[in-house]
Amino acid sequence: MMPSLSFAKHGLFLPGILSLLYFAVQYGANAFHGYGYFVDELYYLACASRPDAGYVDHPPFSILLLKTIVELFGDSLAAIRFVPAAAGAGTVFLTGTIARRFGGGNFAVLLSAFAVMGSPVLLVLFGFYSMNSLEVLLWNGIVLTVIALIQDQKPKLWILVGVLAGIGMENKHTFAVFIIVLAVALLLTLQFRQFLSPYLWLGGLIAFAILAPNFFWEIRHDWVSLEFYRNATALKNLPASPVRVIVDQILSENPGSVFLWVAGVFFFFKQPKETGLRVFGWVFVILLGFLILAQSSRPDRIAAAYPVLFAGGACLLEELRRRWIMPTALATAVAAGIAFLPAGLPVLSPESLAAYASTIGVIPQIEKGKAAALPQWFGDRFDWEKLYESVTNAYEALPSDTRKETVVLGKYYGHAGAIEHFSHGSIPVISGHNSYYLWGYGKGKDKSVLAVGFKREELEGAFKDVKEVGKYSRRFTNETEVPIYLCQGLRIGMEDFWKRIRFFV
């Protein structure tokens, strides 16, 4: 049988077409009209130039993949944003395939796929390079595999689940939360019998084997990532009330799709116990409960849990067989997706986007100190090259003897990453932020520091002479007319100073 005929036979042609459409929109908008590098991308590029088995704030999988991309295709936006767009397309395909697995027809496939395509938070996650886009794809790959092994009674598929879980945890530490919650959900249903299968335990061993390099890296570095997560919880994330958590979920997934994912929860819990599908209802309820208990302001933490809810909800609506439901649901999903498209996709000019964000007034603030004219996921894509130019001007204006002894010190990894990227390594850059701290302060560059992003009082206690030598500004952020300081005459040893500016968050 021809592969294309097999593809059509299994009802995967429509999910395939929708996934290609989503890829075209995502890649076209973000690779060629994406405003600029996102702050995290600049940091990840710095990480990719220093391949390792681990980093302060993430495991190595996404970085090693980025390293491969850079080696083969370069570090342009077009090169590095192919993968997240492809992950988004893959997620749309998996969603449609899951709907087919639940017995859904073309309506269920279309509705669930449109819900994924119109989700602002997923548009953001699939719009720039990070481990988050890969997490969503791997998460839903596991969901589809678990559905298949339950429905087809193929316990050998636990081996594939183990592979995907291992890659998922080697991609992002918090992926382990999903794996643990999935195990708990299995125990809460008749699927607890799955724990009697040797293939499940074999899959677990495979997952640990894949995770092992980062596990031992953490041991060698005194579990430094745990300090990062503690600090991020205390210093970075905003506390949110239970109502705020729910509202942010509705806004981030698109208010026009709330009926669909709520229907998805009902779909799973109305299934007979023997089908095993209640597992996915429990997964969502437990994860949402964690967010509420943790008072998390980060709606993206469980964004990967929604595609299967969209698929289940679409199948439930299809089962009702009411003539008015199908066109109304599809029209609502499409209209809401278009209305909230600018919240997740860079389709407006910066000025128009600022006006849009102000007008709708529903974009959540997800981190402390990030309130600005644009939501942080867009605001931090602007003016990094202007920052580099301002620092370069200050650096080049130094007397040649002073310049030879001067290193640029970035307060945050965004400052350091931008200067390192745009200077192509011609300007020595250090930072005490996250993995930059582990990379050290270099040798012979401890007599003079060009400090970027610091307040004067942070520097005067460590240096005898602190002099403003320039300024930089970044539009659509709270970084306006920020001084650049030349710091000389270190009062303490460089190692002591290095420990003082250590910053894991």
Image (cartoon, grey):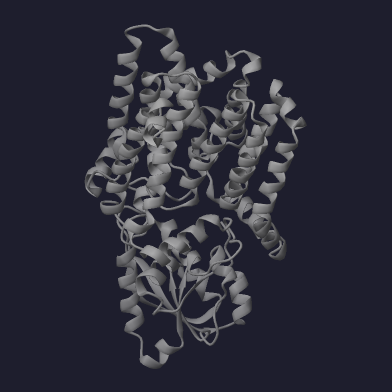
Report the residue that reaches farthest toward the right.
196
Report the residue that reaches farthest toward the front.
1
Q: Position of residue 359 (x, y in %)?
A: 28, 35
Classify residue 62 as left or right of residue 476: right
Quadrant where the image shows the C terminus? bottom right
> Which sits in the foreground, 383 or 483?
383
Classify residue 63 as left or right of residue 256: right
Q: Residue at x 50, y 36 (%)?
A: 304
Quadrant where the image shows the N terminus? top left
How many numbered circles are shown?
Answer: 0
Report the residue that reaches farthest toward the bottom.
401
Q: Residue at x 74, y 40 (%)?
A: 201
Q: Position of residue 76 (x, y in %)?
A: 33, 62
Figure quadrant of residue 153: top right
> Which sits in the foreground, 210 or 388?
210
Q: Position of residue 159 (x, y in %)?
A: 65, 41
Above or below 240: residue 378 = below
Residue 254 visible? The answer is no
Residue 104 visible? The answer is yes
> Which sits in the foreground, 166 or 430?
166
Above or below 301: residue 339 = above
Above or below 385: residue 392 = below
Figure quadrant of residue 222: bottom right
Q: Position of residue 130 (x, y in %)?
A: 46, 52
Q: Residue at x 59, y 56 (%)?
A: 59
